[in-house]
Amino acid sequence: MHRGRGRGGPSRGGPRASGSSFRPPPSETPPGGSNATMVTTNLFPITKLPNKKYWQYELTITPEVKNFARRQEIMARLKTNVAPDLFQSLPIYDGMKQVYVCSELKLHGSGGGKYLVSMNNSPPQVGQRGTYEVRLTKTSAVPVNFSDLPRLLKTRGSSVEAITVATNLLQLIIKQASNQNHPHNARSYFTDQGKMIVQGSGLELLRGFFQSVRPGINQMYINVDTSMTAAYRPGNLVDLCMDFMNTGNARDLALPAGSRGFKKLENFVKKIQVYVSSMKRVKVIRGLEPNADGFQFNKDGVAMTVGTYMKSVHNIDLRYRGIVGAKLSGPNETPIIVPLEVCMVQLGQLYKKRFPEEFTSAAVGFATLKPQERLDWISARGLAPVGDYARSEYITESGMEIATQPKTIQGKVLDIPSVMFKGELKPQNGAWNVLHQHLNEAAPFTTWAAVTFADRVHRAALESHMKSLAECCSNLGMKVGPPVKILEGGGQYPERALKEIIDEAARLGLPKNLFIVLIVLPTNAADLRTQVKHWGDIENGVRTQCIRESKLFKANNQYWNNIALKLNARLGGRNFVVKSPAMARFRCEPTIIMGADVGHPGPGIQRPSVASLVWSTDLDASKYCAVTSIQHPRLERIADLEGMAEIAIKDFASRFGGTPPSRILFFRDGLSEGEYKKTAQEEIQMLENIWKVKHSNKFPKPPKLTYVIVGKGHHLVFFPGSRNAANDGKGNCRAGFVTDQNTEIASALAPDFYLMSHQAILGTSRSSHYILLRDDNNEGIAGIQQLAFSLCHVYAKATRSVSIPAPVYYADLACSRAGFHFSPRSQHHFSDTSSVSSGGGGRQFDLEQWTQEYRPINHSMQTSMYFL
């Protein structure tokens, strides 16, 4: 599973811990006024920093080893078998190229030390398979010294580089022991306690821990959180394959080469490590072979089958005949085929492919933990890393000491803004109801049509559903007209039915900019939805609203009211606005709010990253436009931000009599803490170029810029006490909880805060992290807190506050629609299985080919909220 994009949904969890646990105090009254409160975090203070100096070395392995676990094995073999006397202290290895030690290495030669490491039982020889040359080179004459860190932490922003180096090394120290003893990825380690088998998938779900070191004011902290991942089920390979193919009969594994089932199973088992009992070695599966026991090969000039060989050489009578076997050889090597039944899948192999969509609900249920369960797991002595830190030889050698109790900090609950329909509403627990409300500005729903491409929804049923929708639209104040057409369309060629609809609309002389088509799709119809959206958004400029077939069978007034909100916003209406002191300040002078994001392809996928920019177009910050572009894969900065922001500023000025904005409030999503400073500086420079270089004559004075990063990928969680004013009744913080700007956990690198702007529906809620990098408008932390919280209430298609400001959410939605900009018939499409790189030979990515086929949004849609 990669890069989730949920907003305030269930969070990743760990197992229910046994033994002692920590509970936040029921109620504490801090010295901060009536809205102030104390909450427990999942941060553990480092009470004593390392008292050792650490020298840094670069480690290179020849030939190159791409596998992370294999590099760690080579390093371990170097330390224990090849050069044990070299390391007078424990080596801290990052799994890539950096090694730290607190006793300087006595390397031979001025250029560093070279060592041959054999991963076989035979003596190492240059060029021999399984033999690696390991080179260690000292990279700095000055060691990493933690004695200066307390001084650096006192002043925010001082020596960011030195703090970052120290933070990274501390992180390596705390992870060494757990990574050596447990399956892990770059962020977390996992145990098999409380695991869950996902029947029919060949997988099991593991619980584990995320660990990260964070610099605060005057203090370093360890952030410990629960985590989860999928792994291959250990055990006999026959059982694994049967489970994956969802069969109880091993004979069903007699799959012909090239068949759909064969390809599916082969793709699943490739790269799995198995212990082959006939070889008494661990090998990697490279593919499958049909009818494995009948596969013929020559042994000492005599032709024999795999089945005969197993009996004559290893005295193994095969139980399963005619089924597929494991291929252990590469494409240009002598074939090595073994029966599935002599292979045992090794424990703790993490599943790195996209998690099967049909099992997502099982994974969500497994991950969801109530707040107290989560805190129990994090602070439990027997399971959590907190209990193991004192036993880690790496931490002990460093001299570091870590508190066993989580940090309690001060925060407050912000005043809840009002939501204005025709009348005023006050949200309760982050939510409100549209029942008996009239939309703030209702768009006419008078030129529309509906079509079903779902086999189970026929025309009569569609007419009935549309009648319910029309009634809800009318109750909300929208003027409703009869449909132009309601019809059944063939899912194979949706364009035919859609063309029939717009031809009828054209015959009646209906304008495109007010026309909308409601489309019922089968439950799993990603390709069909892409066809429909490309037809509407790109080719024809017709608004479309897709409805899943499965939603119709339980559709009620609440569901149709939610659809009505989307329709009104798509048609140019305004559902509601927010009333708050922050929004009142927003209206005082021409101000544009921008949200920006970059979405990246998943691991191994060779396709562009997608950048988006959305901007406010009214004085209530409730209506937005968007522009998107594609750029080189995994480029963090928005490559064409200057051009995209120029479009936004020109559009804003055209709506306000030619007056450009005097204030720009820029909310940036998608930047990690390790990259935000450099990327932000580049993006701020691109924005300034617009009014300083390109259009200086059009700006009487430069607009004042406030640049804020909004982060969702952090693991900091807040736990209010049972009688705490911030408790929402379910153990989560109420919507509006925000950390105090002077709290000890505030970042030592830049002004920041955490805001819980939404109510959790399931599990433990997670706040968003705001980092203020530029503030020409002098909003300050308090002003940004109020403004961000208000903007979390203007998300047009929800009747609850969301976890990030609406413009940032909209930017994310615009990025997610990148696939619609390519023709469904194009070879450059955005399906998750397309353009998968095999790692092949450093092939250059050709952005120009993608750019030529990337079509912009249709002109008639450019001023609409098409991205909802």
Image (spheres, rainbow, N blue to C red):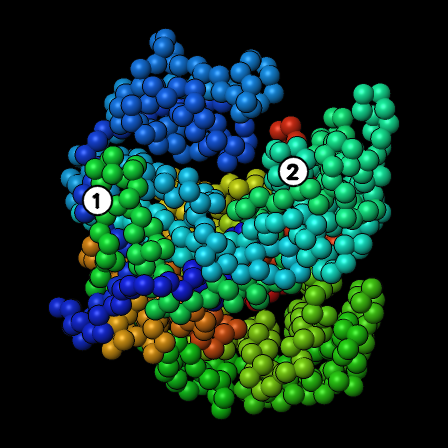
Q: Residue furthest left?
A: 31
Residue sitting at x 74%, y 40%: 316
Secondary structure at badge 2 equals: loop
Image location of residue 729, percent across then percent down: 34, 78
Residue sitting at x 54%, y 34%: 67
Camera-nearest residue between 264 and 183? 183
Q: Does 516 appear above or below 342?
A: below
Name the image quarter holding residue 280.
top right
- The Cα–Cα distance between marks 1 and 2, rounded to whole angstroms, is 45 Å
Image location of residue 720, percent across then percent down: 28, 70
Which of the image's four quarters has the C terminus? bottom right
Camera-nearest residue between 153 and 770? 153
- Observer-side mark, 1 or 2, equals 2
Q: Does 262 appear above or below 96?
A: below
Q: Is residue 844 visible?
A: no
Viewed as shown, does residue 21 lie left or right of 355?
left
Residue sitting at x 60%, y 35%: 282
Q: Residue furthest top?
A: 109
Three-letter amino acid code of the residue under disc 1: Glu
Q: Which mark is residue 737?
A: none
Query: Which residue bears the numbered disc 1?
Result: 401
Three-letter amino acid code of the residue under disc 2: Ser
Residue sitting at x 37%, y 62%: 17
Camera-nearest residue between 851 and 838? 838
Q: Is residue 429 visible?
A: yes
Classed neighbour count for the residue bearing mark 2: other residues with Cα under 10 Å, few (<14), some (14–19), many (≥20): few
Query: Which residue bears the numbered disc 2?
Result: 277
Viewed as shown, does residue 469 lie left or right of 709?
right
Viewed as shown, does residue 850 lie left or right of 349?
right
Secondary structure at badge 1 equals: strand
Q: Does 87 appear above or below 827?
A: above
Q: Residue furthest right?
A: 303
